[in-house]
Amino acid sequence: MEAGADGTRLDRWLVDHVGGLSRARLQALIDDGHVRVDGAVRKAAHRLAGGERVDVEVPPPAPQELAPEAAALTVVYEDEHVLVVDKPAGMVVHPGAGHATGTLAAAALSHAPSMGSVGGARRPGIVHRLDKDTSGLLVLAKSQLAYDALTAQLADRTMSRRYLAVVHGRVGPAEGIIDKPIARHPYHRTRMAVAAKGKGKRAVTHYRVLERFSHFTYVEVRLDTGRTHQIRVHFASLGHPVAGDDVYGDRRATAPVALDGYALHAVALAFVHPATQKRVEFGSDVPSRIEQLLSHLRNTG
């Protein structure tokens, strides 16, 4: 297609000239690099000069059902109702933009095929999630009884999740509560942000300082809510982004050792078992990538 509107924003021009796609879908195509102006990927706010060639690539829709994929899983606990796994950094929990295969959900479906009838077709058994580059404990539902019970506990905030993180800078208070609403970023579709008062969804994060170093702080974190990227967004809003996070942190402020992920680990998980009605608790060892970072910080002060 040839653009003929001088000075028009790319996203607005697409809405007016591309039929059959919603504004949100067009925005996603721009964000994912599927829209090119004279062969170059451009942002939504790019102003068209007029006369350029605009190419829009629309990927085929993802299959409605998830295909199982055999892959190693670190199983912490399993019975007929629940599966607790320790997710490594680098593994995506469920399919999404740019991650159609290699997900934890596909591996879990291969491990427990009956999970395919639980929850959503593209997210079988998935009750909650961790970011791709965050590691640690997740519980998946193997039965509809477990899915209903566990999602209800998430909604009621009775499922306990504890994290360990290394963040940039020296956090002052020994402990604190970050109570700031979170919403989708107004310009970057794949990011979240602290929202203005009265907007977004309430998000509450509790933290306790474990160790302070010259330029970093080791903290324990507990969540009252489970918003997307909550810990990362909240600590970044305080000026203390999670080490290794180049989305919400300053890309120039790198960690002193290679992390291959974020310095963020879901170390403990507790919930009421859907069948026995007894509270169960699970723990995970701090991964070596974070231990190496802590060792370096302790040796260098």
Image (cartoon, rainbow, N blue to C red):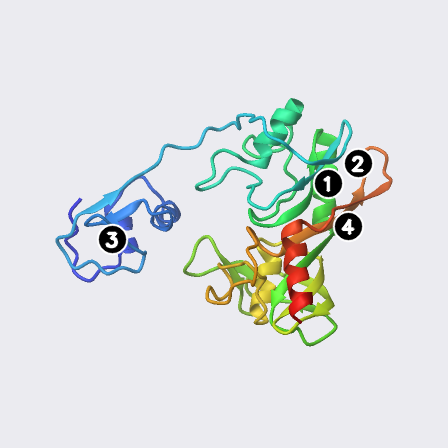
| Left-right relation of 188 to 14 | right
Point out the residue furthest to the left here: 51
Counting from the top left corner in percent of width and height, residue 234 is at 60, 64
Residue 220 in percent (x, y) is at 72, 61
Q: Which residue is mark 2?
A: 274
The circle on residue 150 is 1
Q: Residue at x 44, y 54 (%)?
A: 189
Q: Amino acid at mark 3?
A: Trp
Q: CA distance from mark 1 to mark 4?
A: 9 Å
In the displayed structure image, the side of residue 139 where residue 131 appears, left or right: left
- Tell me what residue is drawn at x 58 percent, y 35 percent: 123
Image quadrant in which the N terminus is located: top left
Q: Residue furthest bottom?
A: 172
Q: Earlier in the sequence, mark 3 or mark 4?
A: 3
Label 3 vs label 4: CA separation? 47 Å
Q: Residues within 10 Å of mark 1 (few under 14, many from 20)?
A: many
- In this rendering, position of residue 19 left or right of residue 134: left
Q: Quadrant of residue 170?
A: bottom right
Q: Which residue is mark 3?
A: 13
